[in-house]
Image (cartoon, rainbow, N blue to C red):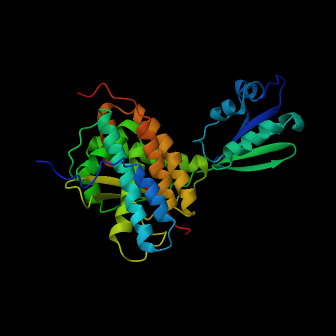
């Protein structure tokens, strides 16, 4: 029995280009959606790169958020902290529908989020294959 | 780079709290000022010795100018510096430590075992040293326990630094801290490193919006 392909596979770094496009729009729905795509560009690229380079085995559950952050901290030091800050910012911008001011905890600008995600992606892509993990 | 071999300055040290004048500084210290880099010399001065006045009497200001500038730059954040054309006085002052505030301390204590507590002390000490050295003007260190909203059982300790600056400046300070934390990561024992990596996270709040 053949099944119809509904979604092709995706390179999660492409979310970043979409996020930049959304970030430049004037409507708030686009800009808030951009925050979501930025985080997922960084998180999914990190998860897939770390998995393909033998640093972790994903659970494919929400626990992967913790797993990826902790593995990044282990392998790339404080880069893991930036990934968590990105996630906190995404949660705040996505879940809180009130007006968000800069002074509010966790809120980050889209520029900061794009720069941070780009740096995380660059660093995980540069990681060598891990031959020590069983 | 200071390469002259002749004497550039006489250095005297005085304990201001007791009024004791200890006279000329030891001969080898005097040698340091005209034979070595000021960064070497600066490490000789005891930064912990507060209320101590070091005075430098230049023999020739023109040859000492670079040394003088480096001394002022090195000490500007934790010393009172008085200077004139002929000399320089440095009074080492007590560094102002940022207030540490625990939010729900019992929860923080619950997550910290004795190893975690030791690691937290190291982290706070690094923050205070950076703040003093870089003139951060850090207002407060907040320590709290965070439970992740989506991932079951994921709890960690968040160390939040409050700066009376704009966000970009506070973010730069956070990245200065990252460099030191990455160095600490290498220095810790394996058990400490495990706690350090799993338990502690960092954030900044900029109060000058």
- The residue that appears at 64% across and 48% down in the rendered structure is B51
Residue B175 at what x, y percent from top left?
51, 48
Which sits in the foreground, B113 or A13?
Answer: A13
Residue A126 at what x, y percent from top left?
44, 35
Residue farthest along the bottom direction in this orientation: A98
- The residue that appears at 83% across and 39% down in the rendered structure is B65
Query: Looking at the image, is A36 positioned above or below residue B29?
Result: below
Q: Answer yes or no: is residue B170 visible.
A: yes
Query: Looking at the image, is B195 positioned above or below residue B157?
Result: above
Residue B204 at what x, y percent from top left?
47, 58
Q: Answer yes or no: is residue B15 visible.
A: no
Residue farthest along the left direction in this orientation: A1
| Left-right relation of B44 to B179 | right
- The residue that appears at 41% across and 62% down in the rendered structure is A35
- The residue that appears at 29% across and 38% down in the rendered structure is A51
Q: Quadrant of the C terminus of chain B?
A: bottom right
| Left-right relation of B58 to A45 | right
Residue A44 at what x, y percent from top left?
33, 48
Query: Looking at the image, is A52 positioned above or below residue A131?
Result: below
| Left-right relation of A80 to B73 | left
Which sits in the foreground, B138 or B194?
Answer: B194
Which sits in the foreground, A71 or A7?
Answer: A7
| Left-right relation of B27 to A54 | right
């Amino acid at each position: 029995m053949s099944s119809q392909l509904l979604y092709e596979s995706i390179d999660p770094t492409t979310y970043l280009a979409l996020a930049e496009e959304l970030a430049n729009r004037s409507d708030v729905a686009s800009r808030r959606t951009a925050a979501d795509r930025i985080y997922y560009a960084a998180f999914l690229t990190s998860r897939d790169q770390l998995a393909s380079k033998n640093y972790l085995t994903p659970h494919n559950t929400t626990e992967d958020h913790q797993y990826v952050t902790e593995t990044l901290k282990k392998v790339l030091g404080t880069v893991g902290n930036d990934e968590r800050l990105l996630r906190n910012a995404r949660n705040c911008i996505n879940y809180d529908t009130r007006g968000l001011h800069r002074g509010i905890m966790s809120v980050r600008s889209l520029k900061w989020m794009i720069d941070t995600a780009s740096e995380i992606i660059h660093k995980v892509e540069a990681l060598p294959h891990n031959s020590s993990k069983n | 780079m200071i390469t002259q071999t002749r004497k550039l300055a006489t250095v005297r040290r005085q304990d201001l709290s007791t009024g004791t004048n200890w006279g000329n500084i030891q001969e080898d210290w005097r040698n340091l000022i005209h034979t070595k880099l000021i960064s070497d010399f600066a490490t000789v001065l005891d930064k912990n010795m507060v209320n101590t006045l070091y005075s430098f009497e230049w023999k020739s200001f023109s040859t000492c100018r670079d040394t003088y500038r480096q001394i002022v730059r090195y000490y500007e954040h934790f010393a009172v510096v008085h200077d004139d054309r002929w000399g320089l006085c440095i009074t080492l002052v007590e560094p102002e430590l940022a207030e540490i505030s625990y939010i729900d301390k019992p929860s923080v204590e619950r997550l910290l075992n004795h190893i975690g507590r030791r690691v937290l002390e190291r982290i706070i000490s690094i923050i205070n040293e950076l703040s003093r050295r870089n003139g951060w003007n850090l207002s407060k260190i907040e320590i709290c326990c965070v439970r992740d909203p989506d991932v079951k059982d994921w709890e960690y300790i968040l160390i939040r630094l409050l700066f009376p600056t704009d966000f970009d400046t506070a973010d730069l300070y956070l990245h200065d801290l990252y460099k030191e934390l990455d160095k600490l990561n290498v220095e810790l024992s394996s058990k400490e490193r495990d706690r350090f990596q799993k338990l502690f996270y960092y954030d900044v709040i900029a109060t000058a919006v």
